[in-house]
Amino acid sequence: DQEAELETLVVASHLRGSGLGSRLLGVVDSELDVRGITDLTVGFIPGNDGAQRFYERHGFRPRWFVFVR
């Protein structure tokens, strides 16, 4: 099995809420479908509640936490 990792998905603040992030994620999902990859991991900075809500709306759930120093 293969797993993909989406390192960064950033939408300019003036375009947030326009659906652009969902369309970009849709393109990623389409490419993963072509490649037969079903697992996608994405990270975001803790406290970025907007990003958390976005990913949760798109079916993502917490799986593991990473600590850095």
Image (spheres, grey):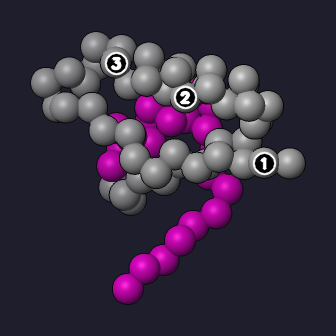
Q: Quadrant of residue 33?
A: top right
Is disc 2 placed on a helix, strand or loop?
helix
Across and down, in percent, residue 55 comes to 50, 36
Question: Alpha-carbon neighbours of circle 1 within 10 Å: few (<14), some, or many (≥20)?
Answer: few
Residue at the spot of label 3: 20
Q: Amino acid at mark 1?
A: Gln
**Which badge, 2 or 1, comes first in the chain's sequence?**
1
**Cβ–Cβ below 8 Å for labels 2 and 1?**
no
Q: How far separated are the C-alphas under marks 1 and 3?
A: 27 Å
On screen, residue 6 versus residue 24, left or right, reads: right
**Which badge, 2 or 3, comes first in the chain's sequence?**
3
Q: Which residues are magenta?
A: 48-69
The image's mark for residue 2 is 1
Across and down, in percent, residue 49 comes to 36, 44
Q: Is residue 52 above or below residue 22?
A: below
Name which residue lies at 65% across and 46% down: 4
Question: Alpha-carbon neighbours of circle 3 within 10 Å: few (<14), some, or many (≥20)?
Answer: some
* Residue 57 visible somewhere in the drawing: no
Residue at the spot of label 2: 28
Q: Quadrant of residue 61?
A: top right
Query: Is 65 included in the stretch rendered in magenta?
Result: yes
Q: Amino acid at mark 2?
A: Val
Q: Amino acid at mark 3?
A: Leu
Across and down, in percent, residue 6 comes to 52, 45
On screen, residue 50 versus residue 66, left or right, reads: left
- Work out which residue is located at the far right of the displayed protein and give it: 1
Is disc 1 placed on a helix, strand or loop?
loop
